[in-house]
Image (spheres, rainbow, N blue to C red):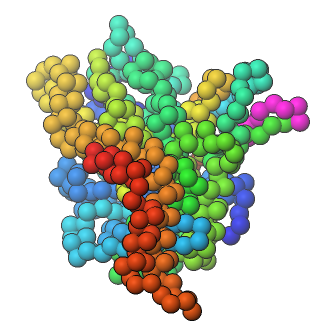
């Protein structure tokens, strides 16, 4: 049963829209944020550093739990729920 | 602008409960839900305590699509080398009326939304409420995309994050300091396997909590609830501890380690993953309750901070149903009196005069108590040590039972820290 977290997300139903609902202001991350809590606290492990060292988010796999929103202290995230019709659609949660 | 008696923001248990109460009395009510159906965005651990809310809508709880009544309780103190499990069964819990049930929200909430519609309430899905419409400090309705709908009363039950109500200044943004994250797998298992693993009669269910190794010293614990043909298997973790942890452990890996633990793996063996879910949970308790009402609106459910971590159980859904019930009741009574502005104060009074806020008040010292990391490491290990010593037999001459037990008790429990912590226990 050694499923990766990406593998786990693969069992979920996501209706992915065109608009991203999370935007990272990397300038804030790069100048103000030391801890980068988002990189380890997201239960879906969606935040990563790209080749340039900027924080990116795979918003398509978002569980809409809100953990990153609460834990990002520097307000570097623009975070909304996806529009109606989009995002996670739980069937057995 | 179209106008109705009441708008309910959010199709969770609080919103559905409010809408059902209002629609049952013939009020024109529109509930707006952003998911494909009520329940599509909702997550639970999984247990609903029905006993506190049974009298509110008895007809609903008799017919609701619950998973299993919880008739057996398990608590496991999980350490790296051993596990101590307490299993509690009682004839009282195994007989009707059942105190609590395991639930899956996509099933339960969808069904409740159908009951709302049957009473004449309107449920609009696939619509995100973007903001509350305000006029001179009064909430007069909502905007969802291009659509604006006016209402005499808006019941905001949008969940723990409270994006819309925070934006409107009706409450503060929730803080990481007093919130937790819950994340779980729903794992399919045959009914007979579930019943055999948790010693259940057909159709009956178990709640199984885990403390200790699960959170690697951080505030929180593991849970496992038996559904009809699946288990809800997850972890609740305090954000403060997770955030401030020096080794920056990847939170999601805790669940994999928990599942692979030699004393847990046999419980989940052979199961197929159905779904992976997560949600923020308020652990602020009594101190986290915002102003519950204002001009033209009432806050209900998680948006009103109504969640309670009682250590051996986490409650929220019963509070949500109760707050929705009282929100509807207060609105109806105020309307009858011809003065809707009376609804807010009436709502707050109903909540304060009943178990809803009283239970939160009683438990107000728990959040501070559970900040002590020793609860999640030292004590589970201590109990494990007592039993390990008691059950150990070697080729050396064995100690008397008294010495075996008291040796461990003295080592782990007779010290200044434990005495101090015992004083703290009296408050909870």
On the question of residue B109 being in view, the answer is: no
**Depth check, front residue: B367 or A66:** B367
Magenta region includes residue B227: no
Left or right: B423 with respect to B211? left
Expressed as whole percent of the image width and height from the top left, the position of residue B424 reads 33, 46
Residue at the outermost top position: B136
User: Looking at the picture, does residue B143 appear above or below residue B326?
Assistant: above
**Depth check, front residue: A48 or B117:** A48
Q: Quadrant of residue B256?
A: bottom right
What residue is rendered at 38% in x and 82% in y? B401
Left or right: B119 with respect to B239? left
Expressed as whole percent of the image width and height from the top left, the position of residue B259 reads 60, 66
Residue at the outermost bottom position: B395
On the question of residue B55 being in view, the answer is: yes
Magenta region includes residue A54: yes
Expressed as whole percent of the image width and height from the top left, the position of residue B329 reads 19, 36
User: Looking at the picture, does residue B130 appear above or below residue B18?
Assistant: above
What residue is rendered at 64% in x and 68% in y? B260
Expressed as whole percent of the image width and height from the top left, the position of residue A22 reads 66, 31
**Depth check, front residue: B58 or A9:** A9
**Depth check, front residue: B241 or A15:** B241
User: Looking at the picture, does residue B188 appear above or below residue B64?
Assistant: below
User: Looking at the picture, does residue B299 appear above or below residue B236?
Assistant: above
Range of residues picked out in magenta: A51-59
What residue is rendered at 23% in x and 76% in y? B91
What residue is rendered at 25% in x and 66% in y? B98
């Amino acid at each position: 049963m050694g499923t990766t977290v990406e593998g786990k997300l693969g069992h979920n139903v996501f209706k992915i829209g065109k608009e991203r609902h999370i935007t990272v202001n990397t300038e804030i991350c790069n100048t103000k944020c030391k801890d980068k809590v988002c990189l380890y606290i997201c239960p879906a492990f969606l935040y990563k550093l790209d080749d340039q060292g900027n924080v990116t988010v795979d918003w398509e796999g978002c569980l809409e739990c809100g953990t990153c929103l609460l834990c990002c202290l520097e307000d570097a995230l623009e975070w909304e729920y996806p529009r109606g019709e989009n995002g996670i659609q739980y069937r057995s949660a | 602008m179209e106008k109705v008696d009441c708008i309910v923001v959010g199709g969770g248990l609080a919103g559905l409960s409010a809408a059902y109460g209002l629609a049952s009395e013939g009020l024109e009510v529109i509930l707006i839900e952003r998911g494909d159906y009520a329940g599509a965005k909702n997550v639970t651990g999984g247990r609903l305590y029905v006993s506190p809310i049974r009298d509110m809508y008895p007809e609903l709880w008799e017919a609701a699509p619950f998973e299993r009544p919880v008739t057996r309780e398990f608590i496991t103190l999980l350490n790296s080398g051993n596990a101590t499990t307490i299993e509690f069964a009682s004839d009282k819990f195994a007989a009707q009326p059942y105190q609590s049930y395991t639930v899956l929200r996509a099933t339960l909430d969808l069904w409740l939304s159908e009951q709302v519609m049957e009473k004449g309430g309107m449920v609009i899905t696939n619509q995100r409420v973007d903001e509350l419409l305000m006029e001179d400090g009064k909430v007069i309705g909502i905007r969802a995309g291009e659509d604006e709908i006016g209402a005499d009363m808006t019941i905001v039950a949008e969940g723990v994050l409270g994006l819309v109500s925070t934006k409107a200044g009706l409450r503060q943004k929730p803080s990481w300091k007093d919130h937790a994250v819950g994340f779980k797998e729903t794992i399919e298992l045959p009914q007979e396997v579930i019943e055999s693993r948790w010693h259940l009669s057909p159709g009956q269910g178990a709640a199984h909590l885990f403390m200790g190794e699960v959170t690697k010293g951080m505030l929180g614990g593991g849970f496992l609830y038996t559904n009809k043909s699946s288990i809800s298997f997850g972890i609740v973790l305090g954000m403060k501890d997770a955030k401030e942890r020096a080794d920056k452990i990847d939170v999601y890996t805790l669940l994999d380690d928990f599942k692979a633990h030699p004393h847990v793996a046999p419980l989940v063996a052979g199961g197929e993953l159905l779904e992976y879910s997560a949600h923020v949970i308020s652990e602020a308790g009594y101190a986290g309750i915002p102003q519950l009402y204002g001009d033209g609106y009432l806050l209900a459910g998680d948006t009103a901070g109504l969640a309670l971590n009682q250590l051996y159980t986490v409650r929220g859904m019963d509070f949500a149903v109760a707050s929705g019930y009282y929100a509807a009741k207060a609105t109806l009574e105020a309307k009858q009196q011809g003065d809707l502005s009376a609804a807010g104060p009436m709502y707050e009074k109903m909540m304060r005069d009943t178990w809803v806020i009283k239970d939160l008040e009683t438990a107000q010292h728990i959040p501070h108590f559970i900040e002590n990391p020793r609860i999640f490491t030292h004590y589970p290990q201590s109990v494990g040590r007592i039993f390990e010593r008691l059950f150990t037999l070697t080729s050396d001459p064995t100690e008397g039972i008294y010495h075996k037990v008291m040796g461990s008790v003295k080592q782990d429990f007779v010290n200044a820290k434990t005495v101090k912590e015992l004083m703290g226990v009296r408050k909870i």
